[in-house]
Amino acid sequence: MSTHELKSKNQVVYEIIREAIINGEFEPGSRIVIDDLAIKYNVSHSPIRECLRLLEADGLVTIRPFAGVTVTDLRPELIMEVFALLESLEIISSCMASHHATENEFERLEKMIDQMEQHTDEADNWAAKNRELHMMIGAIANMTISRDMMERALLHWDRLRRYYLEEVFAQRVPQAQLEHRELLKALRSGEDEQIKIVIQQHNKAALNDYLDHIRKTQEVDI
């Protein structure tokens, strides 16, 4: 049985529309028409409305009474907010995971990083595996609120990456792989301060590269 067959129809449609927004099929600021989505995905209006409510909670669409639904605007300046949020959440969840993880869970994280090596020349696939890795750390930490916030922050990061940072992101993947191994080493150490240092150094280096790229390619002052 496929993964889609195991999920409810509402969940499948939600994930399809969410991915379409993230990959740019629905442009930022564009209007979403419920009738059009119902026809496109062959479902009634009710599940479409439910999906749009979930997407509004994710921050990916804006619903205004009597004005309809629009895809949330996307500005490169948001990278500062997204990175600040991700760094805080990564530190919280990683420190907690470090103290809770079993040896089997550490080995699973290592295996996930090893598997990511096979996708270093495939930016989208590597990014998907990267998201799975961070969500796994969140699951080990068993901090539900932080994990939910992490998932939403990663959605916004993925959207920013695809719109503004594809080229520089692909160039950073090999370095990010090395930084993931440093993070795993810090997690195994159980030392919160070392975990914090590794995450902050990783995020600072990545953010600097991304900001340089944005300044060169976008007409914004960051």
Image (cartoon, grey):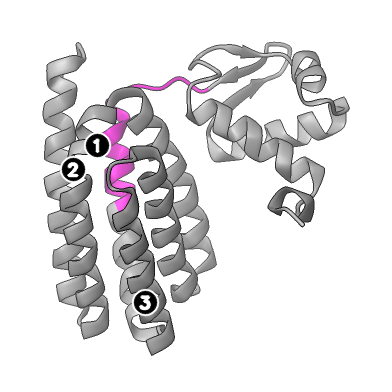
Residue at the spot 60% in from the left edge and 17% down from the top edge: 70
Give the residue furthest to the front.
118
In this rendering, which labeled residue sits more in front, label 3 or label 2? 2
Q: Are marks 1 and 2 in contact (CB under 8 Å)?
A: yes
Using the numbered discs, state the Cα–Cα distance from disc 1 to disc 3 in whole angstroms: 28 Å
**First to last magenta residue range:** 72-86
Residue 29 in magenta? no
Q: Residue 113: where, in percent of width, then height? A: 32, 64
What amino acid is found at the position of numbered circle 1 in the picture? Phe
The numbered mark at residue 169 is: 1
N-term mark: 3 or 2:
3
What amino acid is found at the position of numbered circle 2 in the picture? Arg
**Left-right relation of 80 to 137:** left
At label 1, counting other C-alpha atoms closer than 10 Å, the crowd grade (few under 14, some 14-19, many 20 or more) is many
Residue at the spot 31% in from the left edge and 65% down from the top edge: 114
- Is 209 above or below relative to 222? below
Q: Secondary structure at mark 3?
A: helix
**Residue closest to the eye, 40 or 49:** 40
The numbered mark at residue 85 is: none
Using the numbered discs, state the Cα–Cα distance from disc 3 to disc 2 in whole angstroms: 27 Å
Q: Label 2 belongs to which residue?
A: 172
Q: Secondary structure at mark 1?
A: helix
Residue 81 in magenta? yes
Q: Label 3 belongs to which residue?
A: 96
Q: Residue 60: where, in percent of width, then height? A: 54, 31
- Whether residue 222 is visible, yes or no, is no
